[in-house]
Image: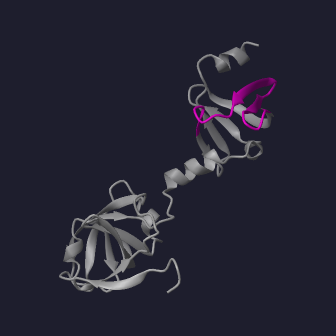
Amino acid sequence: MEPGLFFLLPKDEAAVLHSPPEMDLSQLHHLGRLGKPWGHRGELVFHLGDTELEEVLELGVLFAELDGLRVPFHVSHLREHPRVGAVVKFEDIDDPQSGSFLVNCEVYAPPGHIPPELEQQEDEENLNPEDLIGMLVLDENYGELGEITGTEGTEAHPVMVVRKGEQEILIPMVDDMITGIDFDTGHLVVRTPPGLVDLYRSM
């Protein structure tokens, strides 16, 4: 068997996937919890909690926690349900009885899955200052500050040059000040320290 592939072993009446020992499962992203069987085809209620359904629709494998171990299962289908939120069916689980051992199990995303909020955070941490040129800066307290026309400072400590008309404001590019970035709208939201904007506007 090639390294990194899953292999099948039976558990109860279902075929359960076991992951290779070198795979670190302790850092898997929690998605929700499985509920009671739904219908007669082996589906289970899937309580997603704060997780958006769109985040898990494309995942072909979900990990369920069984006796302290996080065990992967192939997803046959996952669908939204108006009464219970969502239901999921795993391969080789075709009736309520065969899926009963999964009731109340916590569910996790497979290794390598990055939740949207962390993916956005990672993108922000890897930002190239030059990529921000042309974006409109919005301050949480002062509103629109202007457009980023360039950068100054050093590679380790870049500073955004923000201009609106004849007014120029220099804003350090640090995590504490940048609270949001939307490349689709071209907006960058900042929370400047008290007095910074007033200082430049008084010059």
Above/below status of 55 relative to 150: below
192 vs 59: above or below:
above
Residue 62 on the magenta segment: no
Answer whether residue 186 is visible to the viewer in this image. yes
Give the image's coloring scheme.
one colour
- Which residue is the extreme one toward the front? 21
* Left or right of 116, for residue 107: left
Nearer-the-camera pick, 89 or 134: 89
Using the rendered view, name the quadrant where residue 141 is placed: top right
Q: Is residue 111 left or right of residue 178?
A: left
Residue 165 covered by magenta stretch = yes
Q: What residue is rendered at 33% in x and 64% in y? A: 107
Q: Residue 53 in the image: x percent, y percent?
A: 41, 63
Q: Quadrant of residue 91?
A: bottom left
Callout count: 0
Question: Quarter of the image holding residue 191?
Answer: top right
| Looking at the image, residue 54 lies above or below residue 20 | above
Looking at the image, residue 55 sits to the left or right of residue 129; the answer is left
| Position of residue 68 measured from the top left corner of the image (x, y, whole percent) | 27, 64
Identify whether 79 is placed above or below 148: below
Which stretch did the figure color magenta? 153-179
**Residue displayed at 59% across by 22% down:** 193
Q: Position of residue 10 (x, y in %)?
A: 29, 85
Residue 81 in sight from this viewpoint? no
| Residue visible at 46% across and 71% down in the picture | 59
* Quarter in which the C terminus is drawn: top right
Residue 128 is situated, as x and y percent measured from the top left of the image, at 73, 46
